[in-house]
Image (cartoon, rainbow, N blue to C red):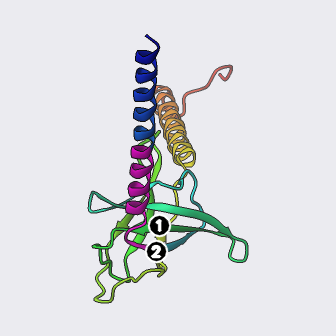
Amino acid sequence: MRRDRATVEGIAGAATIAALIGLFAFAYTVDARSNSGYALIARYRSVDGLTETAPVWLAGMRVGSVEKITFDPESQEAVVRFRIDKNIALPNDSSAAIMSQGLLGGKYVMLAPGGSPDRLAAGDEFQYVQNSVIMEQVLQLIVRGAEKRAEARKAEKSKTEAAPAERAQPAGAAGPGKP
């Protein structure tokens, strides 16, 4: 009986070690794949909501991910470094915009290719960027617009209600308390 228990424990230990080796091998290959391709840089005034590992999209396809976000104290800008698939050749007048994945979704970088025959190389910086749009500010603009339209409708309604009362009284007719 002791021998059976030792055998079971030995097999369980070997299986655990094999699983750990497999896990490390998987982690190494995933890390190696994430480092393939080339890095590009973009500078933004606002990267609100963008995180490291956020996806980078081109033509509706994921072509990379954000590697690092830092702050440049000299220019007062956020510096975003992302890695693009090595098979993607972007014109050097391409743009990088920070977009939202819906109202409550996360942020991602959307690349829009330019028309230049010259290509961006590893370490190059985008000249054309679009900063992150802060959804709270967009919602605030929508609410303000709705409030202004409601006030305009209310003012128009009060004008139309006052006009029939003025027309009902004939010109030159005496008002209340006048002979």
**Residue at 47% in and 71% down:** 129
Q: Is residue 124 magenta?
A: no
The number of callouts visible is 2
The reply to whether dot 2 and dot 1 touch (C-beta < 8 Å) is yes
Residue beneath disc 1? 82
**Picture quarter with the N terminus:** top left
Local packing at callout 2 (Cα closer than 10 Å; few below 14, some 14-19, many 20+) is some
Q: Which residue lies furthest to the top in this view?
A: 1
**Residue at 68% in and 76% down:** 75
| Residue toward you, 139 or 49 | 49
Magenta-tinted stretch: 21-40
Q: Position of residue 110 (x, y in %)?
A: 38, 62
Q: Does the magenta stretch include residue 26?
A: yes
- Which mark identifies residue 68? none
Q: Where is residue 134 in the image (x, y as percent from the top left)?
A: 55, 51
Residue beneath disc 2? 40
**Residue at 42% in and 44% down:** 23
Tell me: residue 172, above or below residue 96: above
